[in-house]
């Protein structure tokens, strides 16, 4: 793969997540009944950061859960290899809550669809929002994000890599190109 | 892992990966909706040439919890009674589009044979005295839950070792996780050797400082007459409160079931807080979900 561009640096990433945190509180008219759920892997630290920012400016703690959607994927036969199933941990009953699903990149929409199915099995939320750091387009399902850090028109042969301090040791979003594709 | 027949060739990492998946499956079983679509479109057949209640139900529930279709075959109500062979029975199921076969047989080696007959994946649901790998996996899972780690832990398996596929599979599996396995029973119910385990006719020696005790059923249906005297067995080998004092305090008790109360195990102990019998059954579903998932997902359909 060939590196093409830096889409967001650490400071731009922080600002994008800070803005999403404000938009979430605005949309929900406060923090009442709000729950953040991060999708494995990088959605988890991103959800944690949004919760931290909300605590900073609202002084209210918002519960954060983690969700693994492997058991809900519809593209397992295309993966070929056995996908790793990871932990799902939701700290409270989601029934009647406003849930914000948090992921790093929105692409085909299949991950979001699987996450919606998983959430429905975990309770009956009053409302589900979708927050993503990067929307790179190419949807295969009628799904859109409610909160987007940055919209990036991409080509199919390009790859968006979100790096987060907690997993990758740095905050940065990069655009790469598959060679020979 | 193409099939699950026994633990030959397994690594510690593979076992741990499977048990990690079982942990996720256990969480699924705690949800309001205890079902995921992971195996939607797959068909699992439970093919039981030998009677069983818990293993068959546990596998069927495991498959259903992952949205697989399940067909169930039991020898007592089948064309086997009309002389159909094991092979033809399996080929009939294969023609119906089955993806996974859970096979229980009174003869050792039937699941191995089956892998040559069918294209689908084969899970050994217990064959003769040879192996019962999913029972060992659920035992390991339950022991890990109770003890945290099996590294350096002494696990005593007590009872009819000779006829026990559970003892054999546990002796194969538990050492992979770092445990030391001791098997104790009357000399007439001890095999010549059991790879992975230390054999002793002394119950006291096996129980001494044991971190956990697994009690086995006397398999009288597999015994020749006179192999053991029941009263003698109870007098010398029944696991009682008094004998259990040799083990570590609060060492948990396991039993693969079905249990003969007050034969191999004192009835009060079976109901005590130390007993993990119900927990084993509960964990069995999660472990079997993990096994079916690991075998079927990512594999080309049969």
Image (cartoon, rainbow, N blue to C red):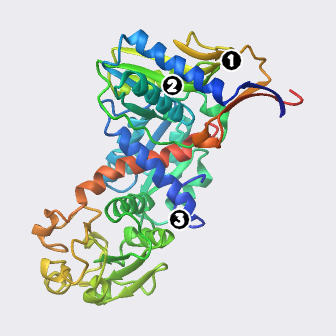
Indicate the position of residue B289 as horizontal and vertical percent values: 43, 45
How far apart are the two marked residues, 1 and 2, measured between alpha carbons?
15 Å
Taking the view exactly as shown, the residue that stands out farthest to the right is A180
Q: Which mark is residue A136?
A: 1
Residue B47 seen in this snapshot: no
As drawn, is B270 to the left or to the right of B68? left
Dot 3 corresponds to which residue? B7
Q: Against B290, is B187 above or below?
A: below
In the image, taking residue B246 as reference, residue A78 lies left or right, namely right
Q: Nearer the viewer, residue A99 or A121?
A: A99
Q: Residue B149: where, in percent of width, then height?
A: 41, 66
Location of residue A55 by image quarter: top left
Quarter the N terminus of chain A occupies: top right
| Callout 3 touching callout 2 (CB < 8 Å) | no
Q: Residue at x 40, y 21 (%)?
A: A99
x and y percent of residue A13 in the render? 62, 26
What chain does mark 2 sit on?
Answer: A
Mark 1 touching mark 3, by CB under 8 A?
no
Q: CA distance from mark 1 to mark 3?
A: 45 Å
Q: CA distance from mark 3 to mark 2?
A: 40 Å
The chain identifier of the residue carrying mark 1 reads A
How would you rate the neighbour count of disc 2 (Cα within 10 Å): few for under 14, some for 14-19, many for 20 or more?
Answer: many
- Closest to the observer: A99 or B162? A99
Same subunit under labels 1 and 3? no
SS at circle 1: loop
Residue underneath mark 2: A102
Quadrant in which the C terminus of chain A appears:
top right
Which label lies toward us, 3 or 2?
2
């Amino acid at each position: 793969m060939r590196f093409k561009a830096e889409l967001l640096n650490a400071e731009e990433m922080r600002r994008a997540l800070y803005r999403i945190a404000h938009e979430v509180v605005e949309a929900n008219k406060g923090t009442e009944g709000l729950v953040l759920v991060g999708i494995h892997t990088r959605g988890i630290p991103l959800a944690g950061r949004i919760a931290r920012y909300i605590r900073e400016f609202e002084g209210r703690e918002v519960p954060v859960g983690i969700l693994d959607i492997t058991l809900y994927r519809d593209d397992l036969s295309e993966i070929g290899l056995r996908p790793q199933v990871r932990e799902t941990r939701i700290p409270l009953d989601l029934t009647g809550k406003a849930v914000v699903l948090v992921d790093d990149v929105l692409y085909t929409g299949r991950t979001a669809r699987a996450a919606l199915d998983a959430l429905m099995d975990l309770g009956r939320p009053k409302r589900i929002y979708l927050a993503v750091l990067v929307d790179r387009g190419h949807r295969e399902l009628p799904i859109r994000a409610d909160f987007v850090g940055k919209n990036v028109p991409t080509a199919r042969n390009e790859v968006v890599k979100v790096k987060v301090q907690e997993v990758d040791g740095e905050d940065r979003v990069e655009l790469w190109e598959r060679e020979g594709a | 892992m193409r099939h699950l027949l026994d633990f030959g060739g397994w690594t510690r990492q593979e076992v741990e990966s499977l048990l990690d998946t079982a942990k996720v499956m256990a969480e699924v079983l705690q949800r309001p909706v205890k079902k995921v679509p992971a195996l939607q479109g797959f068909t699992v057949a439970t093919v039981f040439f030998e009677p069983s209640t818990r293993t068959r139900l546990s596998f069927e529930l495991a498959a259903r919890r992952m949205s697989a279709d399940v067909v169930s075959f039991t020898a007592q109500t089948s064309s086997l009674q009309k002389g159909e062979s094991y092979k033809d029975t399996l080929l009939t199921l294969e023609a119906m589009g089955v993806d996974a076969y859970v096979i229980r047989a009174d003869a050792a080696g039937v699941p191995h044979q089956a892998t040559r007959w069918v294209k689908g994946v084969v899970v050994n649901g217990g064959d003769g005295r040879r192996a019962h790998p999913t029972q060992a996996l659920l035992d390991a899972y339950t022991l890990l839950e109770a003890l945290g780690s099996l590294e350096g832990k002494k696990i005593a398996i007590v009872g009819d070792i000779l006829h026990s596929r559970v003892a054999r599979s546990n002796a194969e599996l538990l050492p992979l996780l770092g445990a030391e396995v001791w098997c104790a029973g009357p000399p007439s119910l001890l095999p010549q050797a059991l790879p992975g385990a230390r054999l002793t006719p002394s119950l006291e020696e096996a129980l001494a400082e044991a971190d956990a005790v697994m009690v086995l059923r006397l398999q009288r249906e597999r015994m020749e007459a006179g192999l053991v005297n029941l009263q003698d067995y109870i007098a010398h080998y029944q696991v009682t409160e008094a004998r259990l004092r040799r083990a570590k305090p609060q060492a948990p008790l396991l039993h693969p079931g079905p249990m003969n109360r007050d034969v191999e195990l004192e009835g009060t102990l079976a109901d005590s807080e130390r007993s993990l019998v119900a927990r084993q059954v509960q964990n069995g579903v999660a472990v079997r979900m993990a096994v079916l998932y690991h075998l079927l997902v990512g594999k080309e359909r049969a």
